[in-house]
Amino acid sequence: MTLEEEEEALYAAASSSAESDISARSTSFDPNFDSDMSRYPASVTSSIRAHVYEGGLRYHAYRDGKYPFPNDDVEQNRDDMKHTMSLMLCRGAHFYAPVEDMFKNGAQVLDLGTGTGIWAMELGDKYPAAEITGIDLSPIQPNYVPENVHFFVDDFEEEWLDPENKYDYIHVRYVVHSVRDMKGLIQKAMHHLKPGGYLEFQELHFYPRCDDETMTAETPYALRDFYHYMEDGMRAMGYELHAVLSLTEELQAAGFENVRSRSHKTPIGLWPRDKRLRLCGLFMRTAIMDGLRGLSRRPFLALGWTQLQIEMFLVDVRKATMNGMFHTFFTFHGIYGQKPLDGGQGSNQQSATATPPSPVGH
């Protein structure tokens, strides 16, 4: 099989897997869903359901500007693509915290930054006794969902109305880079978790690395340049692109116990020999290519770039991303911690272990 034929086969497999995940959004109907929006005040309905359009991209209108990236169909497909890729990286695991028995026995679960809701819905189907709530600034979740899954449009960095000690497990994935007050978020999670409950973050470190000689610090590589500018632009907007790197220490400082971390290399492109990782690399490369315009707009504008300058730069970024000679990867981090059984009033002694990145074949 030629390289072109293999790539076509991988694209077909990727498309089939992604379509299967996306179709999961409408497999169940929630009989409690209220489709009659007329009973809500018009101002509430419009502020939640409306969107903001900017430069040909669509953004959330509720708390406009809080999340710096689009919520349009392209971005939703990217989210579902990254979801499928994450499951492949983690060999089918939706979480690393030891909470499966909690799920089976009726856990209260909170998914922050739920996006399309695909993670919440899959677990709702798998664990019918669990009660899963998804929160997001964008109203992009489906109306037809498992009976035990509920979605709300809200800003999880604001004060939570939930009672103290409500949740068994809180999940945060692929939004860490867009949280302005990470310490405050972790404190909220500690307050609202039950004693013994878990907070878990799953996040990519968006900086391309290489552990062979195909890319060095001196090698011109526009994708690496792109993330340097993204870091500066995000910081100018009040965010920290690389916030995932400090999560272990911040969980410990907040009083979480049994803090653990796991990491996986996430290839960019088709260079690994292992078929599973090649498919992950295809998903990652496609997610980058499809997202470049939407990801770059607001952060680059915050640096004073013009739209023409952005588009001209992205030409080189696309070429670098598609260049198979670079054996580059991001690092996927799964980090979780447990609220002390005494509710955080006892010892603040924590432990942290890190599993080294899994090897990627060449």
Image (cartoon, grey):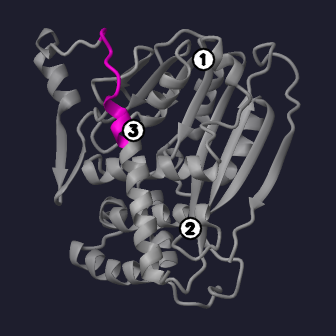
Compared to residue 220, the image places residue 361 above or below, namely: above
Q: Quadrant of residue 266?
A: bottom right
Q: Amino acid at mark 2?
A: Arg
Give the labeled residue for mark 2.
278
Whether residue 342 sits left or right of residue 55 in the image: it is right
- Please state, as top left, top right, bottom left or bottom right, where the C terminus lies in the image: bottom right
Q: Are the residues at dot 1 and dot 2 in contact (C-beta closer than 8 Å)?
A: no
Residue 198 falls inside the magenta stretch: no
Secondary structure at numbered mark 3:
loop
Q: Amino acid at mark 3?
A: Gly
Residue density around tag 1, few if under 14, some if 14–19, many if 20 or more, within 10 Å: many
Q: Amino acid at mark 1?
A: His
Q: Position of residue 112 (x, y in %)?
A: 49, 32
Secondary structure at numbered mark 1:
helix
The one nearer the camera, 61 or 171, is: 171
Q: Which mark is residue 115?
A: 3
Residue density around tag 3, few if under 14, some if 14–19, many if 20 or more, within 10 Å: many
Which tag is nearer the camera, tag 1 or tag 3?
3
Q: Residue lying furthest front in this view?
A: 1
Give the labeled residue for mark 1.
192
Look at the image and give the residue range highlighted in magenta: 22-32
Which tag is nearer the camera, tag 1 or tag 2?
2
Note whether residue 285 is visible.
yes
Secondary structure at numbered mark 2:
helix
Note whether residue 159 is visible.
no
